Amino acid sequence: MFEYQSLVEVYNSLREHKVRTFFTGFGVMWAMIILVLLQGGGRGFYKGTMQKFHNYGNDIIYIQPGYTAAGRLPLTEALADHMVHHLNVFEEAMPIFEHYHSISYAQEKQDSPILGVRVGYEKVNNLALAVGRFFTKRDLAQKLPVCILGSKIKNQLFGTHAAIGKFISIGSSMVCIIGVLEVVDYENDKAVIIPNTFFKVLFPTSIDTIHRMNCILKPKQNAKDIEKKIRTYLAKRLHFKWEDRYALYIFPPDRRVKFFQTLFVVIQGFIWLISLCFLLSGLFNVGNMMLVVVQERTQEIAIRKVLGAGSKDIIGLILLESIIINLMAGIIGISIGIGLIQWINRYLLPIIAKHAGCTDFEYSYTIALVSLAILVCSGCLAGLIPAKRALYIKPIDALNNE
């Protein structure tokens, strides 16, 4: 009966002071909304990025020449092709040339990486076109001046206007645009991609060493064993120590997976830190408001003491009000946050997903319940100081204080 009466008293107190109750719980509610949105957005971004990464293929290995004491490692296209034939562990291999150069269209001018590639570049890098076509064997055989633009460089040069069939200037050469990539990784987004035969005509001084090599491993290959074979083979022919990591950079699939996983652990930790800062701010607000409540109800507490209320009863009354405020604000905050996530998934995400690289926002109900439990327990701590302060009220002093 006493517990029921305590709930009635707390309810009446909250009802009589609606404005105070609202602003007390608003900080907690806002913190829970932010926590839900950040967690949902973080999980969606993680899944979207990992899905995009897996689309590139877990069996792709990247090889890039580095530097030795004699200068940059001279990994030529011919040697790369010979290595592919000799090791016989690759399903596809794509040597890539690169040269930074200014490109222009009408009055627009940009500096961009020019990539020289072979037929099949899109397969190795899992690229898709927004419009146009990829290179054919005829393009390479006839050294045709054609190119494919990354989405970012296309927007910089043409904006919202169509680019297919237009000509851009690379040096003194006019090059026809035959394709525009969908939004992809940073490098291809800013690149102008041309056939490697045409690249050799434009930049004959930039073909002594390939920029990098993308290779698709054959099924059931061990990436670490392949890395060792590549280093051993090239070390013998280019005269460097095979264990020299600066002479030759090799990025196997497992290393890229670990990098992304580590990155998102850091991001997730940062998200939790921000969420907890908001939550602590709300809880301090609750504690501060409960001090005000104790101050306002000084005479009431004194009368309770005179009538025989024990310390446990008084502490319980103050803590109960704090817990109810936190519980109500937390539930409302979680509900609003989940509602916003559903709204974002339905209306906003289809617009931004293509450019943001994320899937549907998700929120774990387990995390929601754990967060709510932590919130309620923290609410007890936030109300503990005001509750203890209420114990030190002397009835005679409180009753004489107007």
Image (cartoon, rainbow, N blue to C red):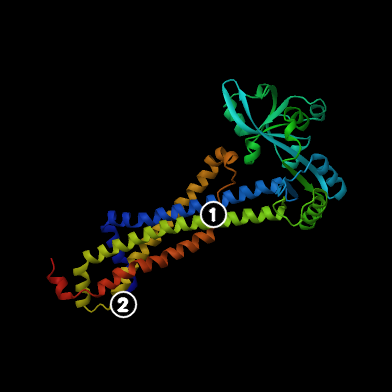
Coordinates of residue 131 in the picture (x, y in percent): 68, 29
Q: Secondary structure at mark 1?
A: helix
Q: In the rendered structure, are the residues bearing label 2 and label 1 in contact, judged by CB atoms less than 8 Å apart?
A: no
Q: Which residue is mark 2?
A: 312
Residue at the image position 69 percent from the left and 49 percent from the top? 54
Residue at 29% over, 58% down: 15
| Towards the viewer: 46 or 397 | 46
Q: CA distance from mark 2 to mark 1?
A: 44 Å
- What's the amino acid at mark 2? Lys
Residue at 85% x, 50% y: name it. 87
Q: Position of residue 83 (x, y in %)?
A: 84, 47
The quarter in which the C terminus is drawn is: bottom left
Q: Secondary structure at mark 2?
A: helix
Asked whether, in this view, residue 203 is left or right of residue 33, the answer is right
The residue labelled by disc 1 is 267
| Residue 342 coordinates in the image, percent (x, y) | 52, 47
Position above or below: 357 against 20: above
Residue 5 visible somewhere in the drawing: no
Query: Is residue 193 shown to the viewer in this render?
Result: yes
Total labels drawn: 2
- The tag earlier along the polypeptide, 2 or 1, is 1
Q: Quarter holding the N terminus?
A: bottom left
Q: Amino acid at mark 1?
A: Ile
Instruction: State the mark number for residue 47.
Output: none
Q: Is residue 78 left or right of residue 122?
A: right
Tell me the crowding category of disc 1: few under 14, some 14 to 19, or many 20 or more residues within 10 angstroms, Cα based: some
On screen, 392 above or below 57?
Answer: below
Dot 2, how many residues are within 10 Å of its Cα: few (below 14), some (14-19), or many (20+)? few
Of tags 2 and 1, the one toward the viewer is 1
